[in-house]
Image (cartoon, coloured by chain):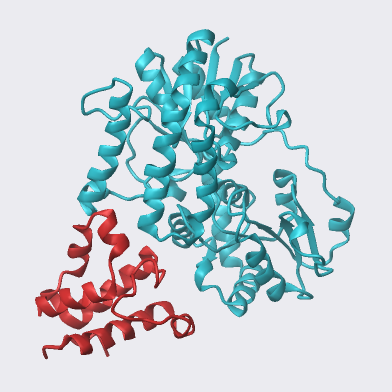
Chain colours: A red, B cyan
Amino acid sequence: MDAVVSTAKLNSNEIFDLMKQFITEVIGEEFVEEMDITMESSFTKDLEMDSIEIVSFSEKIKAHFGEQIDFTGWLSNMDLDQLINLNLGTIVNYIEECQ
Amino acid sequence: MSKFLFVVPPFFGHVSPTLSIGASLIAKGHDVKWFGVTPLADSHIPEGGEYIYPRNDLIEHQDELQRILKRQDDGPACSGPEVMKLALEETYVPVARIMMKGLSKFVEAWKPDVIINDCITFAGALCAYIKGIPCVTTTPVPPDVMGDTANSAPKIFEWQENLIKGLQREFGVNGDDIVIHSHKMNIVFTSEEFAGIQDSMPHMKFVGPVKGRPNHAEFDWERLGKATTPKVFVSLGTLLVDIRKEFFGKLIEAFADAPVTIVAATNPDIFEQWPDNFIVNGFVPQAELMPKMDAVICHGGFNTVNDTFINGLPMLITPIAYDHFHTARLIENAGCGIKIRYKRLRIEDMRKAVFELLENPVYRNASLRIKETFIAAGGNDKAVQLLEEFV
């Protein structure tokens, strides 16, 4: 389960797959099937995640990686354009650097 | 007798509660006018009141204004941060700029005792500040929609402040004070309990829903009277024109021939035929209709939310954009409804949710608790009392 804090360092492909898994858990398999999730997928626009979904996505990241990654803090320091343009690749890079 | 001027935006949901308290003010002998930048049919204006539309002052802005209005159709397809931009940067601030000239002229000519600006109609409070006229703000939605951005999202807070101060400076208001809302009185059309707000600032006055605006819409009461199954009212409000067909298509899929009677407020033209258990009207006498309903489905437009809970009904809320998500969270917190986000709406879930609302009394009981807080907030009488004391 993702409640166990993982200590193994993941590469970017593994992080991408994990993010995809979290996204599927948050928004539901049926809706993910209609989407082509790539590193370029924008978080709010392509994946259409609302604030509540982003919060549960953040919680999954926290449960998996623990305190080493402050995803919510990272998001809260963004301006509007950064949030609008935020894509999965940026998140994968951020997590990779934080590990 | 005092002169009250309501300054309203080109969105009927925000105008609606001002028409109701305006009617009550007129009944008490006050002189009441409205000022807006799109025409409004006379039938909406309470008898004795007047709506001012400054046609000539708007000629130079007409292209921009039409572009802004058309842009609202993009709302449902926008993400949260895009909607913030659409609302503040592309709508509220430019509409205020467009309004200022005609509004200043009218205020100088009519000399209102109080200007009452709707919360997204910044020109009202800005003009009042410049001319030294007392100002009250009306807020039809629960406040705090954006949350505490000063602490949770400092860059977004800074962006908001810069846009508003930039607008103020254009009209010669320099300095750091925000003057696009009243700091003396803000009348909010919900209860503190429903809004989930404790220890609000003393100028925030929660009066609950208001009623009494003119609504001459006709309705086939006889047909409704013959319905034997539970009655579910469905509304998408006055905006969101583009997704109307899709939304009601899903509704038909979920409830055609189901043991419910659907009373839908939408233009029937979108489909050639409706199922027999659907009663569809473009305009409905919503306030009269609501007490006869058993449940409500809506996207979270605030007037329908108020009409629902003042009647103690449970709601399926399908938030689409704007402040709908915030409202949906309040409904879930209060326990008086079920939320399914429109973009994640499955037909089967919608059907299940509606029958759960009809069969499980917990939602109705929670709604009745909200109803009590709404009634205790005082409604029209309280709003009129506050405004008369304010003059």
Is residue A44 found left or right of A81 in the rendered image?
Answer: right
Residue B340 seen in this snapshot: no
The image shows residue B183, relative to residue A26, as above or below, that is above
The image shows residue B256, relative to residue B202, as above or below, that is below
Q: In this view of the protein, which residue sits in the foreground, B286 or B322? A: B322
Residue B208 in the image, given as x and y percentages of width and height: 52, 40
Query: In which image quadrant can residue A4 be found?
Result: bottom left
Residue B13 in the image, given as x and y percentages of width and height: 57, 42
Picture residue at 17% right of the left edge, 81% below the top: A65
Residue B43 in the image, given as x and y percentages of width and height: 73, 31
Picture residue at 75% right of the left edge, 69% below the top: B260
Picture residue at 36% right of the left edge, 63% below the top: A51
The image shows residue B54, relative to residue B163, as above or below, that is above
Query: In which image quadrant can residue A29 be found?
Result: bottom left
Q: In this view of the protein, which residue sits in the foreground, A86 or B46? A: A86
Query: In which image quadrant can residue B384 be found?
Result: top right
* Quadrant of the drawing holding the N terminus of chain B: top right
Is residue B48 found left or right of B66 in the rendered image?
Answer: right
